[in-house]
Image (cartoon, coloured by chain):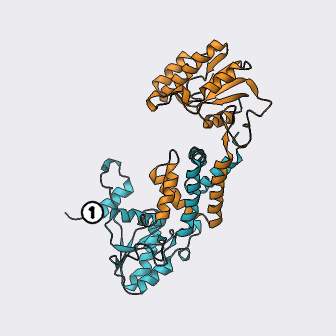
Chain colours: A orange, B cyan
Amino acid sequence: MADYLESLTRLAEQFGRLKGVGRKSAMRMAFGVLDLDDGEVEEFATVLLDAKRKIHPCPICGNLTEREHCAVCSDLTRDKGMICVVEDVKTVLSIEQVREFRGVYHVLGGVISPVNGITPDKLRMRELLQRVGEGEVREVIIATNPTPDGEVTAMYISKYLRPLGVKVSRLAYGIPVGSDLEFADAVTLGRAIEGRRDL
Amino acid sequence: MADYLESLTRLAEQFGRLKGVGRKSAMRMAFGVLDLDDGEVEEFATVLLDAKRKIHPCPICGNLTEREHCAVCSDLTRDKGMICVVEDVKTVLSIEQVREFRGVYHVLGGVISPVNGITPDKLRMRELLQRVGEGEVREVIIATNPTPDGEVTAMYISKYLRPLGVKVSRLAYGIPVGSDLEFADAVTLGRAIEGRRDL
């Protein structure tokens, strides 16, 4: 039956192109569009084009922006001497929500992953070296994900930055706040013991 | 930070309007759109408008179609004497995938749910009575979901159709094929015993 509804199938295909959306969710969302009224669907289409047209990476840090520079880079109160290196823009969003970090970011655009053909030159690594080389930076906090590729990337960056005389740190590993030790996996628990702090 | 990316937030809102899409998934999909290239996003917008413009309910059964009548109703090989009553179009799709049922459908557009203010006159109930009243129909198979509201709706339909001299049946309840009796819930198990068949 769905074969006859060509435009619905095509719409589901469009949703399916988005990262992380499976075939079934895509079809469910295509049906969801039919539940919206005409005006809402027109707005959806307009906003879709609008977002794609307006948003681009910040030339300094690689974060997303609609202006010349991103909100963080153009904020004069942020500490330009402290750069937090992240894999992608979503991590910037997560860290910004905490409202703890007052430095600036550097978005790598991925992690080193030889298996997937991602070598350091495919990431915004040179831009990072250049920013640090300009001398204003005191500390680089590496906030790649705690995955094997994220670890390798962190070590790679640290190796290249240390000779420049900059402090390089890594986010703390440990037991998530509010969780139960009983459910912590062995690796996390090992890291938590290793990184224990004096009380 | 996301507050500055107004067009991204607005795009996430659009995704969030679709039934069953939460705030986090909506944001993830909005980011997904940025990963597509310009041409793909333009195609997405076009297909979105296209689907909404072309698809409408079949005037006979309420199923979705891009033509005058739906694929099932306009198929001359389908048995018009057997109507399967379903809550929504998604159920039509599921049943069609089985390729077992050769009759036609009647989409109610929901189930009776006094709590949510859905009374029988808000569903395509009158159209069903009319179709059955025309005399060609021998059997009505009620395929509403096995929820309390679905049950009430099934009983309501059955009560109104029986006087018209038509056979009214309900999908079989029981243990899903391939599952383990150990994991069946009590209600399903009870129904499976009640509906047992001679071997």
Q: Position of residue A186 (x, y in %)?
A: 46, 23
Q: Amino acid at mark 1?
A: Arg
- Vertical relation: A24 (above or below) A150: below
**Figure quadrant of residue A170:** top right
Query: Left or right: where does residue A177 sit relative to residue B140?
Result: right
User: Looking at this rendering, what residue extends furthest in the right direction?
Assistant: A76
Q: Is residue B34 above or below residue B134?
A: above
The quarter in which the C terminus of chain B is drawn is bottom left
Quadrant of the rendered image containing residue B85:
bottom left
Q: Residues within 10 Å of mark 1 (few under 14, many from 20)?
A: few
Asked whether B54 or B72 is in front, the reply is: B54
B62 or B157, which is in the foreground? B62
The residue sitting at 64% across, 51% down in the picture is B11
Total residue callouts = 1
Q: Nearer the viewer, residue A49 or A199?
A: A49
Q: x, y (%) of residue A181?
A: 51, 26
Q: Is residue A57 above or below residue A7?
A: above
Residue pictured at 73% horizontal, 18% vertical: A135
Judged from this view, the residue extending furthest toward the left is B199
Q: Which residue is painted at 62% across and 17% down in the image? A: A161
Secondary structure under tag 1 reads: loop
User: Which residue is more in the foreground, B51 or A26?
Assistant: B51
Residue depicted at x 68% and y 19%: A133
Residue under label 1, please give it.
B196
Chain under numbered label 1:
B
| Rendered location of residue B35, percent (x, y) | 57, 44
Q: Is residue B97 left or right of residue A113?
A: left
Q: Position of residue B112 (x, y in %)?
A: 52, 70
Give the quadrant of the N terminus of chain B: top right
